[in-house]
């Protein structure tokens, strides 16, 4: 028989406040963000190429279980977990709805759950009015019974309160009978005990043969969760931060509610999230073509070879939605938030910007190739596509743009090969024109080799979330990672990254 193994995602203390009344939450607790943070956890794992077999939630999913909208907020979190497609085990915390209602909501009764050759024991320790918690005699006996009935099954205990080591605080974090619990785990041969409740968390520590880990709160900076890999009875724990550990990160490219292609991106939560996650400057750069044309026209790209479409719009004072966007941009502009546009080519290499919009006081302009005039999808071959692409890059960098958006994404989007032979030429064009190159993971996988060649030629590297989905905001782990693959470490960011 081959050895069992399992990868467990452990998350604790979300203290979510969605539809529920905002209570006097401590300022460092960001319950209003946790639904998106939960979504970001799954996005991060996706970037890391990790596919957990199980998610365990260690309690305090919501801030106030007695709120009349508590169940709706639970449903909301449940929705994100459903979308992840990963099975869930959840234990109730002192802030949640009553334990019986909680465990039935998650179909997660107290007791043993056997998953992939491991025995997870769910405890629903009850809390008294004075915040004290005590494990019942029945629950202590159950641990013993499970061990006796399942010899050889590696056991993992899941509970809200931290068990070990002691915490120096007046607040009763640990159960009053923690010593009895420790004894029961030791006797039952529990290999791992996972807890939450103590927001700082406790690094994994072995005591009498049992490994104890308190998972830090997702709702507090740096917004942590744990990834636990178990092979046989060997346990490996990785603590992961959602927040950036690197200073001076500028997100040069983020969308807003004006984007037709946006899904859940919204300006306000984008600002709040990016700030919380340690981004230093956030640039909103809406698609100019989507501001000039109504949706069907914009997304049809006929405007690219029909200049009269733009001329007609530009003759009107509002220029469809552009004037409104400019007023909006002035409202959101701040020391943290910069404003700009993502601009495309049209009419044989001209920049799609009305004269008065070209003269406007933008903080940043991003040049993008979403579609290429003269390129016919499914007809134009690889070689011709490469030549057309190079032609458009040459045109774009000739304008007063700061950054080239998602270079080479055009090819993967059109199911063509990425022309690595063009890397030196494109890097050279960017270097000669002083245009920065974007690292952008929105529906694209940047090649570290191209980034390396750009950096070598002195081209500045710009981090872009290109957020169309709110969860993409402030997510720069893959950027840091791909730069490392290109030989660029955070130590040299001051010289290598794009800045204002
Ligand atoms: Zn708690
Ligand atoms: Zn784009
Ligand atoms: Zn974009």
Image (cartoon, rainbow, N blue to C red):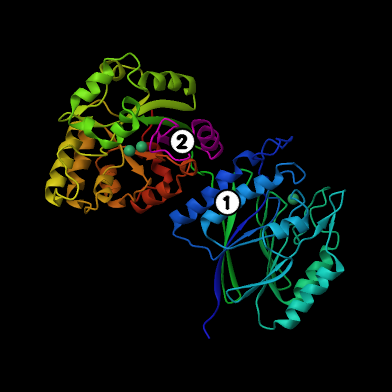
Q: Is residue 366 left or right of residue 86?
A: left
Kindly indicate the quadrant of the structure image that contains residue 436. top left
Q: Residue at x 37, y 51 (%)?
A: 482
Kindly indicate the quadrant of the structure image that contains residue 286. top left
The answer to if 44 sits in the magenta stretch is: no
Q: Is residue 57 left or right of residue 53?
A: right
Q: Residue at x 47, y 22 (%)?
A: 333
Where is ligand 3, by quadrant? top left
Q: Residue at x 38, y 45 (%)?
A: 442
- Label 2 belongs to which residue? 248
- Name the foreground residue: 240 vs 290: 290
Packing grade of label 2 (10 A; few <14, some 14-19, many >=20) is: some
Q: Which residues are magenta?
A: 249-278
The answer to if 268 sits in the magenta stretch is: yes
- Asked if disc 1 and disc 2 are in contact, CB closer than 8 Å, the reply is no
* Secondary structure of residue under mark 2: loop
* Secondary structure of residue under mark 1: helix
Check the image and report above or below for 444 versus 6. Answer: above
Asked if the residue at label 2 sits under 8 Å from ligand 3, the reply is no
Kindly indicate the quadrant of the structure image that contains residue 300. top left
Asked if the residue at label 1 sits under 8 Å from ligand 1, the reply is no
Quadrant assignment for the C terminus:
top left
* Alpha-carbon span between mark 1 and mark 2: 34 Å
- Label 1 belongs to which residue? 79
Check the image and report above or below for 94 versus 435. Answer: below
């Amino acid at each position: 028989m081959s050895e069992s193994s399992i990868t467990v995602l452990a998350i604790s203390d979300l203290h979510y406040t969605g539809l529920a009344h905002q209570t006097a939450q401590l300022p460092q607790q960001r319950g209003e963000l946790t639904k998106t943070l939960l979504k970001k956890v799954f996005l991060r794992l996706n970037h890391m190429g990790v596919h957990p077999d199980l998610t365990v939630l260690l309690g305090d999913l919501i801030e106030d279980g007695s709120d009349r909208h508590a169940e709706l907020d639970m449903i909301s979190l449940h929705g994100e977990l459903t979308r992840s497609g990963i099975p869930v085990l959840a234990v109730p915390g002192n802030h949640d709805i009553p334990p019986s209602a909680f465990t039935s909501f998650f179909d997660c009764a107290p007791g043993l759950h056997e998953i992939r050759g491991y025995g997870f024991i769910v405890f629903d320790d009850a809390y008294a009015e004075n915040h004290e918690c005590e494990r019942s005699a029945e629950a202590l006996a159950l641990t013993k019974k499970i061990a006796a009935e399942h010899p050889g099954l590696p056991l993992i205990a899941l509970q809200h309160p931290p068990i070990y080591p002691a915490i120096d605080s007046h607040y009763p974090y640990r159960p009053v009978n923690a010593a009895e619990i420790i004894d029961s785990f030791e006797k039952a041969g529990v290999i791992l005990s996972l807890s939450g409740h103590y927001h700082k968390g406790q690094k994994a520590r072995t005591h009498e043969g049992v490994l104890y880990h308190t998972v830090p709160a997702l709702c507090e900076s740096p917004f942590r969760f744990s990834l636990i890999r178990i092979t046989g009875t060997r346990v490996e724990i990785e603590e992961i931060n959602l927040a950036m550990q690197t200073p001076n990160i500028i997100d040069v490219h983020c969308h807003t509610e004006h984007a037709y292609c946006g899904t859940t991106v919204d300006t306000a939560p984008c600002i709040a999230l990016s700030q919380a996650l340690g981004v230093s400057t956030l640039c909103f750069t809406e698609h100019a073509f989507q501001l000039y044309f109504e949706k069907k026209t914009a997304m049809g790209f006929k405007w690219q070879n029909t200049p009269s479409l733009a001329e007609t719009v530009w003759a009107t004072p509002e220029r469809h939605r552009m004037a409104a966007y400019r007023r909006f941009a002035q409202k959101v502009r701040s020391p943290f938030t910069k404003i700009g546009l993502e601009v495309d080519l049209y009419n044989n290499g001209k920049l799609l910007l009305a004269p008065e919009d070209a003269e406007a006081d933008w903080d940043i302009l991003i040049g993008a190739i979403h579609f290429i005039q003269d390129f016919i999808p499914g007809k134009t071959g690889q070689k011709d596509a490469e030549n057309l692409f190079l032609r458009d890059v040459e045109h774009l960098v000739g304008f007063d743009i700061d950054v080239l958006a998602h270079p080479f994404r055009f090819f993967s989007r059109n199911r063509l090969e990425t022309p690595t032979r063009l890397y030196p030429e494109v890097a050279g064009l960017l270097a000669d024109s002083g245009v920065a190159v974007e690292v952008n993971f929105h529906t694209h996988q940047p090649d570290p080799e191209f980034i390396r060649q750009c950096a070598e030629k002195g081209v500045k590297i710009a981090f872009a979330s290109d957020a169309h989905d709110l969860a993409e905001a402030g997510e720069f782990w893959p950027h840091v990672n791909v730069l490392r693959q290109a030989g660029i470490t955070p130590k040299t960011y001051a010289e290598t990254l794009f800045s204002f």
